């Protein structure tokens, strides 16, 4: 598999509902990319001087991340699409 370096996190996007709360179906070409993801792999943390800063997220956490994060990179691994993002662009962990 893939092991991110430093403070990078590999996410698998979680698709949003294609229907609004009022029951209106949103066509595929009008949908935004989801900003929720499941953590697939986590780096060991960034260094601050000689100390490593531990990561907050762990594998299988469901997180909310910034849609327009500057560190977000779309990557394809073994034919599957993922997002590689810095932990600092993750906004929070969602309850399971």
Image (tube, rainbow, N blue to C red):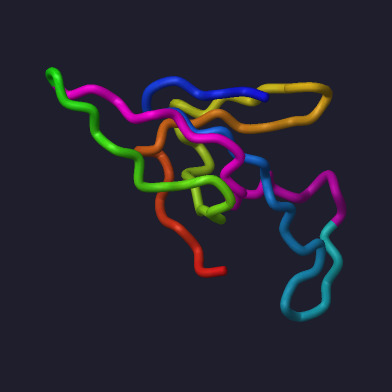
Q: Is residue 55 above or below residue 71?
A: below
In the figure, is residue 36 to the left or right of 24? left
**Residue 83 x/y as whole percent:** 61, 32
Looking at this view, is 29 or 64 the one in front?
A: 64
Q: What is the number of callouts on the image?
A: 0
Q: Relative to residue 30, is residue 64 drawn left or right? A: left
* Viewport quadrant of the N terminus: top right
Within the image, what quadrant is residue 89 found in? Answer: top left
Q: Picture quarter containing residue 3?
A: top right
Residue 73 left/right relative to 57: right
Is 16 situated left or right of 18 in this image? left
Residue 43 spot, x, y in % from top left: 44, 29
At which x and y percent is residue 16?
72, 58
Q: Is residue 87 magenta?
A: no
For the residue pair 18 and 91, the one nearer the viewer reads as 91
- Percent position of residue 7, x then y: 38, 29
**Magenta stretch: includes residue 35:** yes
Query: Which residue occupies 35% across, 47% down?
Result: 56
Q: Which residues are the magenta region?
A: 27-48
Q: Residue furthest left?
A: 49
Q: Is residue 1 above or below residue 56?
A: above
Point 40% across, 51% down: residue? 91
Which corner quadrant holds the C terminus? bottom right
Q: Residue at x 38, y 23 (%)?
A: 6
Q: Residue at x 29, y 25 (%)?
A: 46
Q: Nearer the viewer, residue 31 or 78?
A: 78
């Amino acid at each position: 598999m893939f092991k991110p370096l430093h403070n990078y996190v590999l996410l698998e996007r979680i698709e949003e509902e294609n229907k609004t709360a009022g029951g209106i179906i949103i066509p595929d070409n009008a949908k935004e990319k989801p900003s929720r993801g499941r953590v697939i792999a986590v780096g060991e943390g960034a260094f601050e001087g000689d100390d490593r800063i531990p990561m907050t997220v762990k594998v299988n956490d469901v997180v909310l991340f910034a849609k327009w994060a500057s560190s977000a990179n779309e990557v394809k691994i073994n034919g599957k699409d993922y997002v590689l993002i810095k932990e600092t662009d993750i906004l929070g962990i969602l309850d399971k």
